[in-house]
Amino acid sequence: MKILKKIASNDDNVKIISFSRNFGHQAAVTAGIRNVTGDAVIIMDADLQDFPEEIPELYDMVVEGNYDIVSGWKKKRFDNVITKNLPSKLFNAAARKVSGVFLHDFNCGLKAYKKQVVKSIDVYGDMHRYIPVLAANAGFRKITEKPVQHQARPYGVSKFGTERFIRGFLDLVTLWFVSRFGGRPMHFFGAVGTLMFLVGFLSALWLGISKLIDVYYFKIYGNLIANNPWFFISLTMMTLGTMLFIGGFLGELIVRTKREHKNYHIETEF
Protein backbone atom coordinates (compact mmCIF):
# COMPACT_ATOMS: atom_id res chain seq x y z
CA MET A 1 0.00 0.00 0.00
CA LYS A 2 2.89 2.36 0.72
CA ILE A 3 4.23 1.83 -2.80
CA LEU A 4 0.79 2.44 -4.30
CA LYS A 5 0.35 5.64 -2.33
CA LYS A 6 3.75 6.83 -3.46
CA ILE A 7 2.88 6.15 -7.11
CA ALA A 8 -0.52 7.86 -6.75
CA SER A 9 1.04 10.94 -5.17
CA ASN A 10 3.20 11.42 -8.26
CA ASP A 11 0.57 10.55 -10.88
CA ASP A 12 -2.92 12.04 -10.94
CA ASN A 13 -4.11 9.22 -13.24
CA VAL A 14 -3.56 6.59 -10.52
CA LYS A 15 -6.49 5.98 -8.19
CA ILE A 16 -6.36 3.65 -5.20
CA ILE A 17 -9.47 1.94 -3.84
CA SER A 18 -9.05 0.59 -0.33
CA PHE A 19 -11.56 -1.53 1.62
CA SER A 20 -12.01 -1.56 5.37
CA ARG A 21 -11.14 -5.27 5.31
CA ASN A 22 -10.56 -8.08 2.83
CA PHE A 23 -13.89 -8.63 1.05
CA GLY A 24 -12.43 -10.97 -1.57
CA HIS A 25 -11.64 -10.97 -5.26
CA GLN A 26 -15.15 -10.26 -6.47
CA ALA A 27 -15.55 -7.08 -4.42
CA ALA A 28 -12.22 -5.77 -5.71
CA VAL A 29 -13.16 -6.45 -9.35
CA THR A 30 -16.59 -4.87 -8.95
CA ALA A 31 -15.20 -1.74 -7.27
CA GLY A 32 -12.60 -1.37 -9.99
CA ILE A 33 -15.19 -1.76 -12.76
CA ARG A 34 -17.41 0.89 -11.20
CA ASN A 35 -14.60 3.43 -11.02
CA VAL A 36 -12.80 2.96 -14.35
CA THR A 37 -12.84 5.81 -16.85
CA GLY A 38 -10.43 4.71 -19.59
CA ASP A 39 -11.30 3.18 -22.94
CA ALA A 40 -9.74 -0.18 -22.01
CA VAL A 41 -10.08 -2.03 -18.71
CA ILE A 42 -7.40 -4.54 -17.75
CA ILE A 43 -7.84 -6.82 -14.75
CA MET A 44 -4.87 -8.64 -13.25
CA ASP A 45 -4.49 -10.72 -10.10
CA ALA A 46 -2.08 -9.55 -7.41
CA ASP A 47 -0.49 -12.93 -6.70
CA LEU A 48 2.50 -12.11 -8.97
CA GLN A 49 1.84 -15.07 -11.26
CA ASP A 50 0.97 -12.80 -14.19
CA PHE A 51 3.37 -10.43 -15.93
CA PRO A 52 2.51 -6.71 -16.22
CA GLU A 53 4.60 -6.68 -19.42
CA GLU A 54 1.60 -8.27 -21.12
CA ILE A 55 -0.57 -5.19 -20.56
CA PRO A 56 0.54 -3.04 -23.56
CA GLU A 57 -0.27 -5.77 -26.08
CA LEU A 58 -3.61 -6.50 -24.44
CA TYR A 59 -4.38 -2.79 -24.56
CA ASP A 60 -3.49 -2.57 -28.25
CA MET A 61 -5.70 -5.57 -29.07
CA VAL A 62 -8.69 -3.86 -27.43
CA VAL A 63 -8.10 -0.33 -28.68
CA GLU A 64 -6.42 -0.91 -32.04
CA GLY A 65 -7.72 -4.39 -32.78
CA ASN A 66 -11.26 -3.39 -31.75
CA TYR A 67 -11.84 -6.53 -29.68
CA ASP A 68 -14.50 -6.39 -26.99
CA ILE A 69 -12.62 -8.84 -24.76
CA VAL A 70 -9.12 -10.26 -24.83
CA SER A 71 -8.71 -13.12 -22.36
CA GLY A 72 -5.35 -14.37 -21.18
CA TRP A 73 -4.50 -18.01 -21.80
CA LYS A 74 -1.93 -19.67 -19.56
CA LYS A 75 -0.79 -22.34 -22.04
CA LYS A 76 2.09 -23.34 -19.78
CA ARG A 77 1.10 -23.34 -16.14
CA PHE A 78 3.21 -23.63 -13.03
CA ASP A 79 0.53 -24.85 -10.64
CA ASN A 80 -0.05 -28.17 -8.91
CA VAL A 81 -1.29 -30.63 -11.55
CA ILE A 82 -3.66 -32.57 -9.29
CA THR A 83 -5.16 -29.84 -7.13
CA LYS A 84 -5.34 -27.00 -9.66
CA ASN A 85 -4.43 -27.84 -13.26
CA LEU A 86 -6.71 -30.88 -13.67
CA PRO A 87 -9.78 -29.29 -12.00
CA SER A 88 -9.18 -26.15 -14.08
CA LYS A 89 -9.15 -28.16 -17.33
CA LEU A 90 -12.39 -29.90 -16.39
CA PHE A 91 -13.97 -26.60 -15.39
CA ASN A 92 -12.94 -24.86 -18.63
CA ALA A 93 -14.24 -27.74 -20.75
CA ALA A 94 -17.62 -27.58 -18.97
CA ALA A 95 -17.72 -23.78 -19.29
CA ARG A 96 -17.07 -23.94 -23.05
CA LYS A 97 -19.75 -26.57 -23.52
CA VAL A 98 -22.43 -24.82 -21.48
CA SER A 99 -21.74 -21.19 -22.42
CA GLY A 100 -20.82 -21.56 -26.09
CA VAL A 101 -17.90 -19.16 -25.56
CA PHE A 102 -14.70 -20.88 -26.67
CA LEU A 103 -11.90 -19.87 -24.32
CA HIS A 104 -9.17 -22.15 -23.09
CA ASP A 105 -8.79 -20.43 -19.72
CA PHE A 106 -11.83 -18.78 -18.13
CA ASN A 107 -9.99 -18.60 -14.80
CA CYS A 108 -7.05 -16.56 -16.08
CA GLY A 109 -6.97 -13.37 -14.02
CA LEU A 110 -5.35 -11.35 -16.80
CA LYS A 111 -8.05 -10.01 -19.14
CA ALA A 112 -8.69 -6.84 -21.12
CA TYR A 113 -12.11 -5.32 -21.87
CA LYS A 114 -13.60 -2.38 -23.62
CA LYS A 115 -15.06 0.02 -21.08
CA GLN A 116 -18.57 -0.31 -22.48
CA VAL A 117 -18.39 -4.09 -21.96
CA VAL A 118 -17.85 -3.95 -18.20
CA LYS A 119 -20.25 -1.01 -17.87
CA SER A 120 -23.05 -2.89 -19.64
CA ILE A 121 -23.10 -6.09 -17.56
CA ASP A 122 -23.97 -6.86 -13.98
CA VAL A 123 -21.20 -8.76 -12.17
CA TYR A 124 -22.32 -10.32 -8.90
CA GLY A 125 -21.40 -13.22 -6.61
CA ASP A 126 -18.41 -15.06 -8.08
CA MET A 127 -19.37 -14.22 -11.65
CA HIS A 128 -16.15 -12.29 -12.38
CA ARG A 129 -14.70 -15.40 -14.04
CA TYR A 130 -17.72 -15.44 -16.35
CA ILE A 131 -17.50 -11.85 -17.57
CA PRO A 132 -16.84 -13.12 -21.14
CA VAL A 133 -20.04 -15.19 -20.96
CA LEU A 134 -22.05 -12.31 -19.51
CA ALA A 135 -20.67 -10.04 -22.22
CA ALA A 136 -21.50 -12.54 -24.99
CA ASN A 137 -25.07 -12.80 -23.67
CA ALA A 138 -25.27 -8.98 -23.79
CA GLY A 139 -24.27 -8.95 -27.47
CA PHE A 140 -20.50 -8.43 -27.30
CA ARG A 141 -19.18 -11.13 -29.64
CA LYS A 142 -15.69 -9.90 -30.54
CA ILE A 143 -13.97 -12.12 -28.01
CA THR A 144 -10.50 -13.59 -28.42
CA GLU A 145 -7.66 -14.86 -26.28
CA LYS A 146 -3.93 -14.31 -26.07
CA PRO A 147 -1.32 -16.71 -24.69
CA VAL A 148 0.34 -15.07 -21.69
CA GLN A 149 3.30 -15.90 -19.52
CA HIS A 150 2.77 -17.57 -16.20
CA GLN A 151 5.02 -18.31 -13.25
CA ALA A 152 4.82 -20.16 -9.97
CA ARG A 153 3.27 -18.26 -7.10
CA PRO A 154 6.17 -16.71 -5.14
CA TYR A 155 4.23 -15.98 -1.95
CA GLY A 156 1.21 -17.34 -0.14
CA VAL A 157 -1.00 -20.29 -0.93
CA SER A 158 -3.68 -20.47 -3.61
CA LYS A 159 -7.27 -20.66 -2.31
CA PHE A 160 -8.41 -22.52 -5.42
CA GLY A 161 -9.52 -26.03 -4.51
CA THR A 162 -12.39 -28.47 -4.61
CA GLU A 163 -14.78 -26.04 -2.92
CA ARG A 164 -14.14 -23.25 -5.43
CA PHE A 165 -14.34 -25.73 -8.29
CA ILE A 166 -17.81 -26.83 -7.13
CA ARG A 167 -18.93 -23.23 -6.58
CA GLY A 168 -17.67 -22.29 -10.01
CA PHE A 169 -19.60 -25.11 -11.64
CA LEU A 170 -22.79 -24.18 -9.77
CA ASP A 171 -22.32 -20.55 -10.84
CA LEU A 172 -22.00 -21.78 -14.42
CA VAL A 173 -25.30 -23.67 -14.15
CA THR A 174 -26.91 -20.57 -12.63
CA LEU A 175 -25.57 -18.40 -15.44
CA TRP A 176 -26.86 -20.82 -18.07
CA PHE A 177 -30.31 -20.88 -16.48
CA VAL A 178 -30.52 -17.10 -15.99
CA SER A 179 -29.34 -16.40 -19.54
CA ARG A 180 -32.01 -18.70 -21.00
CA PHE A 181 -34.93 -18.27 -18.62
CA GLY A 182 -34.09 -15.22 -16.48
CA GLY A 183 -36.46 -13.02 -18.46
CA ARG A 184 -39.19 -15.64 -18.83
CA PRO A 185 -39.23 -17.97 -15.79
CA MET A 186 -42.74 -19.18 -16.67
CA HIS A 187 -41.34 -20.90 -19.77
CA PHE A 188 -39.34 -23.23 -17.53
CA PHE A 189 -41.26 -23.57 -14.27
CA GLY A 190 -44.64 -23.38 -15.98
CA ALA A 191 -43.74 -26.03 -18.55
CA VAL A 192 -42.24 -28.44 -16.01
CA GLY A 193 -45.05 -27.80 -13.53
CA THR A 194 -47.76 -28.35 -16.15
CA LEU A 195 -46.14 -31.59 -17.31
CA MET A 196 -45.84 -32.92 -13.76
CA PHE A 197 -49.44 -31.97 -12.96
CA LEU A 198 -50.77 -33.66 -16.11
CA VAL A 199 -48.85 -36.87 -15.45
CA GLY A 200 -50.10 -36.93 -11.86
CA PHE A 201 -53.67 -36.07 -12.85
CA LEU A 202 -53.84 -38.69 -15.61
CA SER A 203 -52.39 -41.29 -13.25
CA ALA A 204 -54.97 -40.47 -10.57
CA LEU A 205 -57.72 -40.52 -13.21
CA TRP A 206 -56.63 -43.96 -14.38
CA LEU A 207 -56.67 -45.21 -10.78
CA GLY A 208 -60.24 -43.90 -10.41
CA ILE A 209 -61.36 -45.50 -13.68
CA SER A 210 -59.74 -48.80 -12.67
CA LYS A 211 -61.60 -48.69 -9.36
CA LEU A 212 -64.93 -48.12 -11.11
CA ILE A 213 -64.25 -51.00 -13.52
CA ASP A 214 -63.46 -53.31 -10.59
CA VAL A 215 -66.66 -52.34 -8.77
CA TYR A 216 -69.21 -52.32 -11.64
CA TYR A 217 -67.88 -55.09 -13.86
CA PHE A 218 -65.94 -57.42 -11.59
CA LYS A 219 -67.79 -56.74 -8.31
CA ILE A 220 -64.48 -56.25 -6.45
CA TYR A 221 -65.01 -53.93 -3.50
CA GLY A 222 -61.97 -54.48 -1.27
CA ASN A 223 -59.27 -52.74 -3.30
CA LEU A 224 -58.93 -49.22 -1.97
CA ILE A 225 -57.27 -46.62 -4.18
CA ALA A 226 -55.31 -45.37 -1.16
CA ASN A 227 -53.64 -48.79 -0.86
CA ASN A 228 -51.95 -48.26 -4.21
CA PRO A 229 -48.56 -46.46 -3.86
CA TRP A 230 -49.09 -44.81 -7.24
CA PHE A 231 -52.00 -42.88 -5.71
CA PHE A 232 -49.62 -40.97 -3.42
CA ILE A 233 -47.10 -40.53 -6.22
CA SER A 234 -49.86 -38.99 -8.34
CA LEU A 235 -50.88 -36.61 -5.55
CA THR A 236 -47.26 -35.61 -4.99
CA MET A 237 -46.72 -34.92 -8.69
CA MET A 238 -49.87 -32.81 -8.90
CA THR A 239 -48.84 -30.85 -5.78
CA LEU A 240 -45.29 -30.24 -7.03
CA GLY A 241 -46.58 -29.37 -10.48
CA THR A 242 -48.95 -26.79 -9.03
CA MET A 243 -46.18 -25.29 -6.87
CA LEU A 244 -43.80 -25.05 -9.84
CA PHE A 245 -46.49 -23.40 -11.95
CA ILE A 246 -47.22 -20.85 -9.20
CA GLY A 247 -43.46 -20.30 -8.79
CA GLY A 248 -43.15 -19.53 -12.49
CA PHE A 249 -46.12 -17.17 -12.33
CA LEU A 250 -44.62 -15.30 -9.35
CA GLY A 251 -41.30 -15.17 -11.19
CA GLU A 252 -43.01 -13.53 -14.15
CA LEU A 253 -44.58 -10.93 -11.84
CA ILE A 254 -41.19 -10.17 -10.29
CA VAL A 255 -39.49 -9.87 -13.68
CA ARG A 256 -42.19 -7.54 -15.02
CA THR A 257 -42.34 -5.27 -11.97
CA LYS A 258 -38.63 -4.99 -11.13
CA ARG A 259 -36.61 -1.98 -12.14
CA GLU A 260 -35.57 -1.97 -15.78
CA HIS A 261 -31.96 -3.07 -16.14
CA LYS A 262 -29.90 -2.66 -19.28
CA ASN A 263 -28.60 -6.14 -20.03
CA TYR A 264 -28.00 -5.62 -23.71
CA HIS A 265 -25.61 -3.68 -25.94
CA ILE A 266 -26.72 -1.24 -28.64
CA GLU A 267 -23.97 -1.19 -31.26
CA THR A 268 -25.31 1.58 -33.51
CA GLU A 269 -28.15 4.06 -33.52
CA PHE A 270 -29.63 5.90 -36.52
Image (cartoon, rainbow, N blue to C red):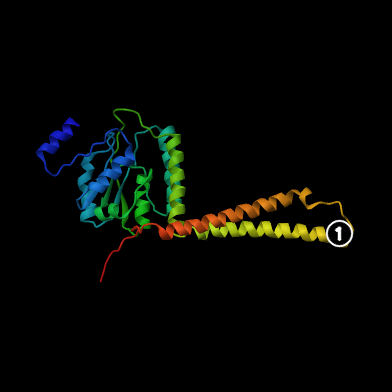
| Quadrant of the image occupied by residue 241 | bottom right
Q: Position of residue 224 (x, y in %)?
A: 81, 51
Q: Is residue 206 above or below residue 79?
A: below
> Where in the figure is residue 2, as x and y percent of width and height?
17, 30
> In this view, which residue lies farthest toward the right?
219
Foreground residue among 38 and 110 = 38
Of 196 and 118, the residue lying toward us:
196
Secondary structure state at the residue bearing disc 1? helix
Which quadrant of the rendered structure holds the C terminus?
Answer: bottom left
Q: x, y (%) of residue 233?
A: 69, 50
- Residue that protrudes farthest toward the bottom in the picture: 270
Residue 226 percent coordinates (x, y): 77, 50
Residue 142: quarter of image: bottom left
Dot 1 alpha-carbon crowd within 10 angstroms: few under 14, some 14 to 19, many 20 or more: some
Nearer to the camera, 129 or 223:
223
* Quadrant the N terminus occupies: top left
Q: How many marks?
A: 1
Taking the image as shown, residue 155 lies to the left or right of residue 247, namely left
**Is residue 90 among what the camera can see?**
yes
Asked whether residue 105 appears in the rendered view, the answer is no
Reading the image, the residue beneath label 1 is 215
Q: Give amino acid for label 1.
A: Val
Comparing 93 with 36, the one in front is 36
The residue under the point 22% across, 44% down is 55
Q: Please give the name of the residue rendered at 21% of the width and 55% of the height, measured from the top-left corner.
A: 63
